[in-house]
Structure formats: C-alpha cells, structure tokens
Image (tube, helix red, strand yellow):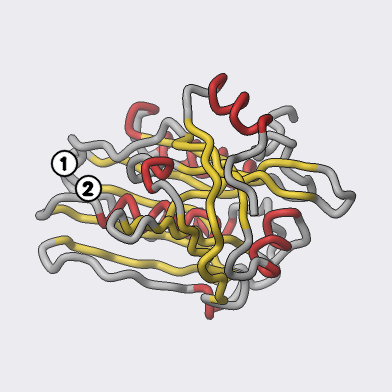
Amino acid sequence: MLSAPDATSIELAKRLNAQARLFEVVTSSPLGASLREVVLRGDPALAGVPGNDVMVRLVDAKGKYVRRRYSVRSIDEAQGLVTLWVVTSHEGAGARWAREATPGDQVDLIGPRGKINLDSLADWNLFVGDTSGLASFYRMAQSIEKPGRVVFIVEVDDINDALTAPFDEGLGVTGIFVERNGRAYDDPTGLLGGLAAFEMPAGLGHAYLFGEFHVVRALGVALSDRGMTQEQQSHKAFWRAGRHNAEHGEPEKDL
C-alpha cells in the first residue's frame, strides 16, 4: 500500500496552489443507466466549496497516466468521505476506473480545483446541462440558504439517469429532465427547448451551464439573447463530443 501520492501529483498541486492527497476507494456503485457513485476516503478539504472539483490521476487504455476532473457531489467531514458521480456511458480512463474501482484501491487526488462558486447575491439560480453536471448542480443547490428558488434543466440519455436530490422545504425547486432521444451529443436542441419553456422569475438570477463544449456555448448565447449578462452566467465545459479530454482532464478549447 502506498503512503503518499505520486511525486508528479505533489509537484502539480504546488503549481496549481492546491493539495495532493492519497485517497482510498470505499464503494463504487451504479446510480442509473450511465452514472456511478464513487465514494473515497481521504481529506475532505480537497473538495473545497460547492462548485469545486478534484483532479484524479488514472491510467488510460494504453497504460499512460492521465488526469480527469470530477465535480464533488458531497462530503462527510466526520467520516472523511468525498463522493463523486462519474458518467460511464463512454469508453475512457475515468469511466473505466469508476466501473472497475473496488474497495481498498488507492488513487491520487488534487484539489480543490475550479473557479465557479455559488452567486450569493442571486435571488434565483438556474442550472442547465447534461448528466455530467448533476453532481455539481445538486451540491451547489443544497448549499443555498432559504428562501430561494432553484431550477434544473438537465438532458439525460436514459430516463433512469433522471436522479433527484433532497432539499430544504423552504427552497423552491423545479426540475426539468429532457430525454436526448438519439440527438448528437453536441446538439443543443433539447436543452434549448427546455430553456425556451423556462420563464425567468423576477429578481436577480444566475445561470450555471455545465456539460458538453458546444452545447454550453449555445446555451450561453441563448441566455444572453434573453437579457442575462455575462456576469450572471457561469460556463464550464466538462467534455467535448468526439474527443477525449486532454491529459490535464479538460476538453481542448480550440475549434
């Protein structure tokens, strides 16, 4: 058993002004048709605040070490647990790890990562994206102080991935799940349709757009056309259709 993360993880964490720690797999279990929940034991401080993610060191199909970033679904400080939701409907280093992870496995994590946090001034919050954003959406929304209003518009490949979460009674919550119905992964039509059906409430709102690279861009344009400023939008592309993420765990930004 290892007692410390790999030297490359320690060095990278220093450059990123983050921390590197060794975590142990507690459980890995299916949640839906294409989502798995991976529970890790380690230092919850690496999970940061709602909206943050962690970088996981994995091995790809060619035996090469790569890193993948995953939003944190929840933490249990008392038990030292960090829970991730991982999409497994594709072939990749992260999906394979989540499917094959067994209790006792060790893995390097770097965190906290990410710059998107909850807008404390918003009267209502809109979360739009695909299943890759669900973990972050729910963790962020569960941290909102009541009263408040939250709307989720999420596209799923399978209705069994339309997972819900508990919220305080004082929080107004609306969930809209859109089935992909065979559309291409970079086709924003489904989410744009869900967004068109959404009537913006009064007051100051903030939108969080997480998911596929091209879809996130299209959603941002649609919200801008409806009067939401750039300051009222937070964009995060988790992946890009037809391409593996880069070694650092994020999709390439070139066109």
In the image, which disc is placed on residue 124? Answer: 2
Locate the N terminus and report the quarter of the image it occupies: bottom right
**Quadrant of residue 253 within the rendered picture:** top right
Asked if labels 1 and 2 touch by Cβ distance under 8 angstroms, the answer is yes
The residue singled out by tag 1 in the image is 203
Q: Earlier in the sequence, mark 2 or mark 1?
A: 2
Q: Residue at x 89, y 50 (%)?
A: 62
Quarter holding residue 146: bottom left
Please state if 94 lies on the left or on the right of 243 as rendered.
Answer: left
Q: Is residue 143 left or right of residue 42?
A: left
> x, y percentage for residue 202?
17, 46
Dot 1, crowdedness within 10 Å: few (<14), some or many (≥20)?
Answer: few
- Residue 58, labelled with which disc? none
Q: Going by the picture, which residue comes out furthest to the top?
A: 15
Question: Whole-percent x and y of residue 152?
Answer: 37, 59
Mark 2 vs mark 1: give the one in front: 2
Secondary structure of the residue carrying tag 2 is: strand
Q: CA distance from mark 2 to mark 1?
A: 7 Å
Residue 218 as seen in the image, left or right of residue 60: left
Q: Amino acid at mark 1?
A: Gly
Please determine whether, in this image, residue 21 is positioned above or below residue 189.
above
| Secondary structure of residue under mark 1 | loop
Choose between 163 and 194: the one closer to the eye. 163
Q: Residues within 10 Å of mark 2 (few under 14, many from 20)?
A: many
- Residue drawn at x 29%, y 65% is 174
